[in-house]
Structures are given as structure tokens and as C-alpha cells.
Image (cartoon, helix red, strand yellow):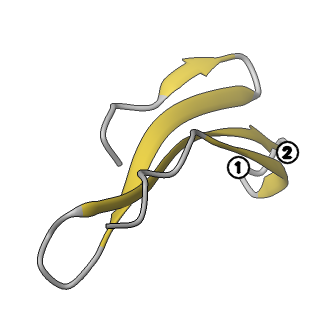
Amino acid sequence: MTSEPARHHDSALFHWRITDAAGATVLTGLDVVQVDDAGRIRRLTGFFDQAPAAG
């Protein structure tokens, strides 16, 4: 994760990134999660940012 989760009622969102073995960013995005009354994930929706150009 690249941000602390921001919570509001039963929802939270956070930013993340995926890196390769050398530590270079491969993909970034944002996830929104909704939890039930027991705190279990009810729904997870992911959004991908634009991937870096292949080089």
C-alpha cells in the first residue's frame, strides 16, 4: 500500500503499487473495500492506473 486506508462507515479506500524484482513500479491503482458487520470483506473493487510504458 502506498497510502493509509481512508475509512468511512463500512467502506475504505487505499492506493497501492506493484513492483518488479528490481523495485521498479509495474502498476499502480486504488482499491475500495466494503466490510460487513463482522469486519469481513463484503466487496472489493480495484481500479488500475495507467501502467508505465514497456522499456
Between residue 53 and residue 45, name the one nearer to us. Answer: 53
Between residue 36 and residue 2, name the one nearer to us. Answer: 2
Q: Residue at x 35, y 49 (%)?
A: 1
Rendered image quadrant of residue 18: bottom left
Left or right of 8 in this view: 36: right
Q: Residue at x 41, y 51 (%)?
A: 52
Most distant residue in the top direction: 8
CB within 8 Å, label 1 to label 2: yes
Q: Quadrant of the C terminus?
A: bottom left
Rendered image quadrant of residue 49: top right
Between residue 34 and residue 47, name the one nearer to us. Answer: 47
Q: Residue at x 85, y 45 (%)?
A: 36
Up/down of 35 relative to 41, above or below: above
- Name the disc covering residue 39, or none: 1
Across and down, in percent, residue 12 comes to 63, 29
Across and down, in percent, residue 29 comes to 54, 43
- All told, the count of numbered labels is 2
SS label for mark 2: loop
Across and down, in percent, residue 5 comes to 45, 31
Up/down of 40 relative to 14, above or below: below
- Name the disc covering residue 36, or none: 2
Judge the density around disc 1: few (<14), some (14-19), many (≥20) Cα neighbours within 10 Å: few
Looking at numbered disc 2 in the image, what kind of residue is underneath it? Asp
Between residue 32 and residue 38, name the one nearer to us. Answer: 32
